[in-house]
Image (cartoon, grey):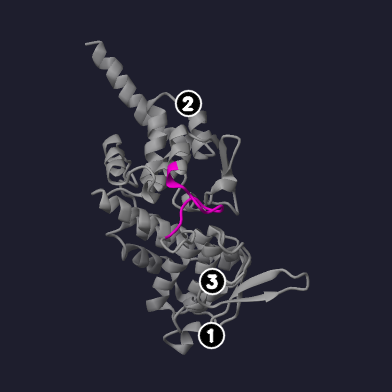
Amino acid sequence: MRVALKYICEDVDRHGNVRCYVRAPGKRKVRIRAMPGTPEFMEEYQAAITTAAEAPLRQADEAKRGSFRYLCIRYYSSAAYKALDVSTRNWQRRALDEIAQDHGAKQVATMQARHVRRLRDAKTETPAAANQRLKALRALFTWANEAEETSVNPTIGVRKLKYQSDGHHTWTDDEIQRFHERHPLGSQARLALDLLRYTTGRREDAPRLGRQHVRDGRIRFRQAKNEHRNPVDIDIPVHPALAESIAAAKVTSNMTFLLTEFGKPFTANGFGNKFKDWCRQADLPHCSAHGIRKATLTKLAERGATPHEIMAVGGHRSLEEVERYTAKARRSTMADSALRKL
């Protein structure tokens, strides 16, 4: 099968199986093990392209043994890094490469906690990004200590920034209705929203779902989050509204319900960006894919679903994770009960 993607090459093994690789000029070829045409293939392809297309080091000495850039390169080639989910690898690499742009040539042995705090505080205006930068550094030095690449760990004792945030905006019923009015039944946008809403999937999950996940009136899939470390399998009934949406969209692909304008499966990032476009078209610029998941789980809590029922639908592993939804619902119910007693 010929795949028209940049840097893709193929060969055939002794059993007659076609193998796909990314081979960029001057770079080591990277095997793509997923089946061509699937979202998993595109995820692996994007990760390989990111590695292959990495800009040349600005200074030759940045990659000297003991430098921050050298440590990052060693980490990226480690089994620990490669075992991470694609999305985790991507955000860690973005955070570390951003640091390496200015500090790549510096020696790791001289790095102290005050330097890490300075790097964290450089992102104070966006606390979530600041904490993510710290998290990436922790992962790097935890691996480096275990691999005996360095004996220092300047992240020890450095705390995350504290800030108040409810995370992604939770969609309201009115906002869902506005999206419906702009994107009617049968459109890709409407199908995308319904997949998110009735599976509680994340942006990494929705573009991977296809007919192969639906059988006997149920939809079964493995969540993309932590799928290589602590996988969670979802097994829920197909909601009638979702079944109607799939039928109305007249899906032609057997592998994925959602396709790009070029007839290809979405990557997680590509889907997230496209969904934001659909939200803006509906005059909902503050809404996102993850907010739909929150809306569904919140609605379940408000309608009396037990914590264990919410866990089964959302794929949570602990009661503590669903407490944010049930506690809010209980407050609302108790407030209604209290005022009726006046």
Query: Hey, which residue is sitting farthest bottom in the picture?
Result: 60
Q: CA distance from mark 2 to mark 3?
A: 43 Å
Residue at the image point whose x is 53% and y is 75% from the top: 73
Q: Which is more N-terminal, label 1 or label 3?
A: 1
Name the residue tied to disc 2. Answer: 306
Q: CA distance from mark 1 to mark 2?
A: 56 Å
- Amino acid carrying mark 2 in the image: Thr
Magenta segment range?
Answer: 248-260
Nearest to the observer: residue 188 or residue 248? 248
Disc 3 from disc 1: Cα separation: 13 Å
Residue pictured at 32% horizontal, 63% vertical: 121
Query: For residue 25, which numbered disc appears in the image?
Result: 1
Indicate the position of residue 194 as horizontal and vertical percent values: 41, 42
N-terminal label among 2 and 3 = 3
- Element at label 3: helix
Q: Tell me the mark number nearer the camera, choosing from 1 and 2.
A: 1
Which residue ends up furthest to the left in the rendered image? 342
Which residue is label 3 attached to? Answer: 48
Q: Which residue is depicted at the point 48% across and 72% down?
A: 50
Q: Secondary structure at mark 2?
A: loop
